[in-house]
Amino acid sequence: MNDTEAVEDHRDENRFVLAADGAEAELQYRTRADRLILIHTEVPAALGGRGIGGRLVEAAVERARREGLTIVPWCPYARKWLGDHRDLPDTVTIDWKTLPPGS
């Protein structure tokens, strides 16, 4: 894998996807009104340790920035990543208080 592999936004499937080395990583999401709800990040072991999960979250931040959406990080990985990279999310609004149903 190299940095030229782009994250794709498969809007019809509600997921950001990065395919590399015969495997596929994804960040599932929902959109509700002006919110981009990050549901679940999945990076197969074959792609682990390469920062791909972070690249998926960065793609979500970029979409939120472009479209004026508020990010709602229900996904534990996305929530931690955004918290660890506070400089990047400063350009978008993040709703830290809304948790997934049943939390």
Image (spheres, rainbow, N blue to C red):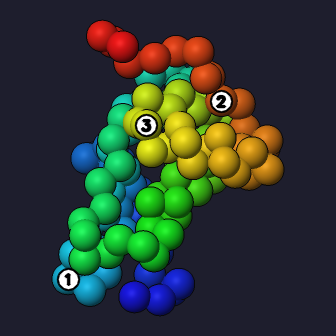
Label 1: which residue?
22
Left or right side of 63 for 36: left
Kind of element beneath mark 3: helix
Q: On the rendered structure, is 15 left or right of 67? A: left
Q: Amino acid at mark 1?
A: Gly
Which is closer to the viewer, label 2 or label 3? 3
Q: Residue at x 53, y 37 (%)?
A: 79
Viewer-side residue, 97 vs 9 = 97
Point out residue 80 in the picture as x, y percentages from the top left corner.
55, 42
Residue 35: percent from the left, percent from the top?
53, 26
Q: Quadrant of the C terminus?
A: top left
Are the two marked residues, 2 and 1, in contact with CB atoms closer than 8 angstroms? Answer: no
Numbered tag placed on residue 94 in the rendering = 2
Instruction: Please report whichever mark, 2 or 1, sits nearer to the chain's N-terminal start.
Output: 1
Label 2, label 3: how many angstroms apart (C-alpha)?
Answer: 14 Å
- In this rendering, the answer to whether 34 lies above or below 87 is above
Up/down of 56 relative to 2, above or below:
above
Instruction: Tell me the quadrant of the picture where the N terminus can be found.
Output: bottom left
Q: Label 1's element?
A: loop
Tell us which disc is closer to us: 3 or 1: 3
What is the x, y in percent for residue 44?
Answer: 24, 66
Q: Secondary structure at mark 2?
A: strand
* Residue placed most toward the observer, 51 or 65: 51
